[in-house]
Amino acid sequence: MDTVRIGVIGCGPMGQGLAKAAKEFEFVRLEAASDVGEKVLGDFCNSIGGKPFKDYREMIRNVRLDAAIVASPPFLHREMVEALADAGVHVFCEKPMSTNVADCDAMIRHCEQRNVKLMIGQVLRYHGIPARVRELVKSGVIGAPLCMIVRRIWGGFGTSWGTSWRTRRKESGGNLMEINAHEIDFMRTVCGDVRTVMAVGVRHPHSTLDFPDATVVSMAFKSGAMGALHSGAVSVIPSFGGRVDGDQGGIEFPVIWGEGAGIHVKTEKETKFIPAAEIQVENPVKAELRGFFAALREGVPIPVPGAEGRAAVEIAEAAYRSIDTAAAVALPLG
Ligand SMILES: NC(=O)c1ccc[n+]([C@@H]2O[C@H](COP(=O)([O-])OP(=O)(O)OC[C@H]3O[C@@H](n4cnc5c(N)ncnc54)[C@H](O)[C@@H]3O)[C@@H](O)[C@H]2O)c1
């Protein structure tokens, strides 16, 4: 495939970012876009390009596409991915892959049966600090990882996300999917598959969410390592960072991006700090699309296939089950 003709479904901020990055590849032609919001669709097509369609099924029926970007709210990902696969269109689908594991399984099966490639937008993999942390751990510099802690916390004084679908778990998957699909994927790609999940959650008295605002998710990895994710919208002092302790050293990344971002590494041989400025990476959204298009054009493997997106959803779903039942939840989910 020389030219890749693409369509975009969901023209919000993420659809716009992906479309702009896709257009930077000279072999990409943005043919069409779809959104139920007339203004957002009009603005998208006027400023970025593509023929506008209010109904994405009409776009699929009327435009010849090689690939499509799905950047709609998560509860719509399954029906859109399946409709695209039915038309033989390869799909780049935003995270979270869907709002539950059953949907993810159906999406994977559907794409496999129609011989269509499916990639999930776990873009944190392409950000400098997480990518370097993973690389360092995989290089064995701190030995075998024993414990990984990640916190991604934010909040105002009782405020939540503005977009309405983000306040409802059925539509967003809850923060553990909608936001922390990234951190869960990060922890999984550093420490390996998860055996058991145990979680607790709390609600802010002014919460507008129909799921816990803040959660602590502990994970027992198959390797024997343990992990903890602190996620939440109740922290007026925001923070995004973490650490990995290995049996021969440790890594701390107090801040993942912005001021003070960098990585401390301590082993018996050395103690060093790698500032974020020394970790140069391509625009992460462009980098993930580069991998997607390479899979389409050169036949290399999809960098983040459906199974990887599913794994993050499964851990988050297990965490919510654990919160609801106050019990540990073993994977795979039955
Ligand atoms: N990778 C990241 O870092 C990152 C960041 C932000 C969002 N996202 C993901 O991207 C997706 C979209 O997020 P967003 O912030 O752009 O959300 P958004 O709500 O701002 O935009 C989504 C768009 O989808 C449109 N839409 C809804 N129903 C539709 C339908 N039936 N057909 C066509 N369009 C429809 C909405 O009108 C809206 O314009 C979500 O899955 C989100 O988790 C990823």
Image: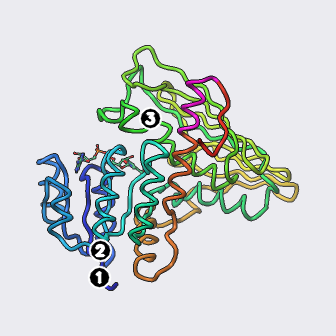
Q: Earlier in the sequence, mark 1 or mark 2?
A: 1
| Horizontal side, residue 53 vs residue 108: left or right | left
Q: Which mark is residue 174?
A: 3
Q: Residue at x 42, y 56 (%)?
A: 107
Task: For the N terminus, give its image quadrant.
Answer: bottom left
In the image, what residue type sits under mark 2? Asp
Start-end of magenta stretch: 317-326
Q: Residue at x 86, y 59 (%)?
A: 269
In the image, what residue type sits under mark 1? Thr
In the image, what residue type sits under mark 3? Gly
Q: Residue at x 51, y 63 (%)?
A: 304
Q: Secondary structure at mark 1?
A: loop
Mark 2: few/some/many CA within 10 Å (<14, 14-19, 20+): many
> Image quarter for residue 48?
bottom left
Viewer-proximal residue among 76 and 43:
76
Q: Residue furthest top?
A: 205
Q: CA distance from mark 3 to mark 2?
A: 32 Å
Q: CA distance from mark 1 to mark 3?
A: 37 Å
Q: Which mark is residue 66?
A: 2
- Image: 268 above or below 63: above
Magenta stretch: includes residue 325: yes
Q: Earlier in the sequence, mark 1 or mark 3?
A: 1
Please give the residue where the numbered disc 1 appears in the rendered image: 3
Q: Residue furthest bottom?
A: 2
Q: Earlier in the sequence, mark 3 or mark 2?
A: 2
> Image quarter for residue 330?
top right
Q: Residue at x 34, y 58 (%)?
A: 81
Discs 3, 2 touching: Cβ within 8 Å: no
- Residue 165, given in percent of the width and then of the height, sits at 31, 35
Q: Which mark is residue 254?
A: none
Discs 1, 2 touching: Cβ within 8 Å: yes
